[in-house]
Image (tube, rainbow, N blue to C red):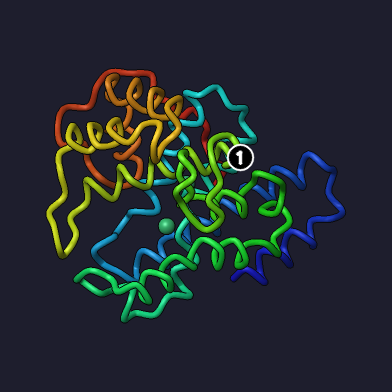
Amino acid sequence: MLTATTSLLRASGDLPTASIHGCGLTFLHQMAESLGRAIDARDPNTALHSEHVAELSLLIARNLGLDDHECNLIHIAGHLHDIGKIGVTDAVLKKEGPLSTEEQLEMRCHPVIGAQIVAPVGLCATTGGIADIIRCHHERYDGGGYPAGLRGAAIPIGARIVAVADTYSAIIQNRPYRPGTTPELAMAEIERCSGLQFDPDVVETFRNTFCHGRVHVALSYAGIPASFPMPDVDVARKMAWPS
Ligand SMILES: [Fe+2]
Ligand SMILES: [Fe+2]
């Protein structure tokens, strides 16, 4: 599918620059959504996780005041953040108990594998863009993450955003080894890790959107009905992707 994406982007070379950009990004988004569902389908326990991360990342990016293009790239990176798990064996990916040291090392390869998978797509390869976000989504703000141990602003802002969205979605979803928590407990855990695992500015923005009910609205876009009445808010997701 990546070959088809690249071919179509190349085939659009005769169009004016603005059209190339728009068409390419729209197509890339559709492919990213499709590939995100593919990786989620490998593990039924993580259904819709990639869609969650895409929607929440877009919500945070918009509320941080990033420009439309950056928001688009971060949204697409959210769909694709775990695409590298295609390169992780089922024995490790679907293991229900704790991972051994060797298994952890294999699992920790998925950000780099994912970045390598998307790198041939020109729109993914910009500095701080989709490939970099995928590579850095398990870096920690305090420098204790992987694969490179980057710290603070050295981590692309998109990756700092996806890290929060990824963790929130993972905490609220059921897993074979534990039930999902309530949104409030998940939010409390994100705040507990502010300045350690997560960028404090990103956490503060996420907290503000959470308090206004927008996190629940964003998740409803990902196919999860809100568990309580939908708040009457100006939905942060202003962008309508052309079909
Ligand atoms: Fe999307
Ligand atoms: Fe991941």
Counting labels gives 1
Describe residue 148's horizontal placement relative to residue 82 as left or right: right
Residue nearest the viewer, comparing 125 with 229: 125
The residue located at (61%, 30%) in the rendering is: 68
Instruction: Report crowding for label 1: few under 14, some 14 to 19, many 20 or more residues within 10 A (C-alpha).
Output: some
The residue located at (46%, 73%) in the rendering is: 86
- Does the Cβ of the disc 1 residue fall within 8 Å of ligand 2? no
Kind of residue at badge 1 = Ala
In this view of the protein, can residue 14 be seen by the observer?
yes
Q: Which quadrant of the view contains residue 94?
A: bottom left
Residue nearest the viewer, comparing 63 with 127: 127
Q: Residue 64: x and y, percent?
A: 50, 24
Q: Residue 223: x and y, percent?
A: 30, 47
Q: Which quadrant of the view contains residue 60?
A: top left
Residue that badge 1 annotates: 154
Q: Which quadrant of the view contains residue 181?
A: top left
In this view of the protein, can residue 27 be seen by the observer?
no
The residue located at (64%, 35%) in the rendering is: 69
Q: Residue 96: x and y, percent?
A: 20, 71
Q: Quadrant of the N terminus?
A: bottom right
Whether residue 70 is situated above or below residue 51 in the rendered picture: above
Indicate the secondary structure of the residue bearing disc 1: helix
Q: Residue 240: x and y, percent?
A: 52, 35
Describe residue 220's horizontal placement relative to residue 72 as left or right: left
Describe residue 216's horizontal placement relative to residue 241 as left or right: left
The residue located at (56%, 36%) in the rendering is: 157
Quarter of the displayed picture in which ligand 2 can be seen: bottom left
